Image: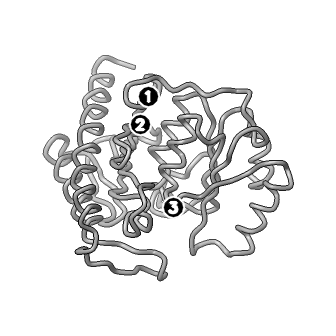
């Protein structure tokens, strides 16, 4: 990596962390006054969005535009803003909107950066826990400044796996995944935020995470975190319109990769 490229990466990494925490503070204020939020449904009654999601994404986009006006931005609420540089920011202002609106703490702000086709930055901030997960290519992963390194002895049988589900995937498919995992001696949780469960994989709290269909803004930051902590993730399509469409998402510590790939059929 040239010094120029390294400087570009460091500058964006610093901004991603700063913006995630600032956006998280705004989201937390909404969370603490959530009875006043206007809530809308999207394609499905369980797929909800609030004014907080839109306000937080607008704040993040404004900060990026001020600092790096030539970068592209892809966000869950406002889609793609094309740019001229090699960098693309991928943003989920509040991942886990359902827990957020129902008063549960398992939601987060997720910010990733691509350089070309490579995920080079991943930052996930969890306001209710004041936890900052941060990773950049070649720099490792940290949680509140402490280095994260995955334990290769952890498997689906001696640790917990995260499973995700949404209206894009049939109930029978989800039931089959859970059945296979339990048959193999595993156990699972689902906390309502795929991004946060991926952060938990990087932190060693979960040994792996699988969801049959996720969008880039849900998984990119978590993928960077898991990779930099020494784990593995299934590739996400980033060329053409791949970034704006969903894909299977799987990330795991090395000791769980083969079992979870078999369960997922990946």
Q: Residue furthest left?
A: 66
The numbered disc on residue 133 is 2
Instruction: Check contact, mark 3 vs mark 2: CB within 8 A.
Output: no
N-terminal-most mark, 3 or 2: 2
Instruction: Check contact, mark 1 vs mark 2: CB within 8 A.
Output: yes
Up the image or down, 207 lies above or below 214; here it is above
Q: Please state if 5 lies on the left or on the right of 238 as rendered.
A: left
How packed is label 1: few (under 14 Cα within 10 Å), some, or many (20 or more)? Answer: many
Q: Residue at x 74, y 33 (%)?
A: 255
Which residue was labeled with disc 3?
Answer: 192
Query: Marks 1 and 2, how far apart in space?
Result: 6 Å
Up the image or down, 9 lies above or below 186; here it is above
**Which structural element holds mark 2?**
strand
Which residue was labeled with disc 1?
Answer: 142
**Which structural element holds mark 3?**
loop
**Horizontal and vertical percent position of residue 262:** 80, 50
Q: Residue at x 16, y 40 (%)?
A: 67
């Amino acid at each position: 990596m040239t010094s120029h490229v390294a400087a570009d990466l460091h500058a964006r990494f610093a901004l991603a962390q700063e913006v995630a925490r600032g956006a998280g503070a705004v989201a937390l204020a909404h969370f603490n006054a959530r009875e006043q939020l206007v809530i809308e449904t999207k394609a499905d009654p369980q797929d909800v969005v609030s004014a907080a999601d839109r306000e937080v994404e607008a704040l993040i986009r404004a900060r990026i535009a001020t600092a790096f006006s030539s970068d592209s931005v892809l966000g869950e609420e406002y889609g793609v803003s094309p740019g001229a540089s090699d960098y693309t920011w991928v943003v989920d202002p509040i991942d886990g909107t359902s827990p957020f609106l129902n008063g549960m703490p398992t939601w987060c702000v997720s910010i990733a950066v691509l350089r070309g086709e490579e995920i080079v930055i991943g930052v996930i901030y969890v306001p209710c826990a004041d936890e900052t997960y941060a990773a950049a290519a070649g720099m490792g992963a940290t949680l509140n400044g402490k280095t994260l390194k995955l334990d290769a002895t952890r498997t689906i049988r001696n640790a917990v796996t995260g499973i995700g589900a949404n209206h894009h995937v049939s109930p029978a498919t989800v039931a089959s995944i859970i059945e296979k995992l339990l048959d193999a001696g595993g156990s699972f949780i689902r906390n309502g935020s795929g991004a946060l469960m991926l952060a938990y994989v990087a932190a060693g709290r979960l040994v792996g995470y699988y969801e049959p269909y996720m969008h880039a803004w849900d998984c990119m930051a978590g993928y960077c975190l898991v990779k930099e902590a020494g784990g593995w993730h299934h590739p996400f399509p980033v060329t053409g319109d791949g970034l704006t469409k969903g894909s299977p998402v799987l990330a795991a510590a090395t000791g769980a990769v083969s079992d979870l790939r078999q369960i997922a059929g990946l």
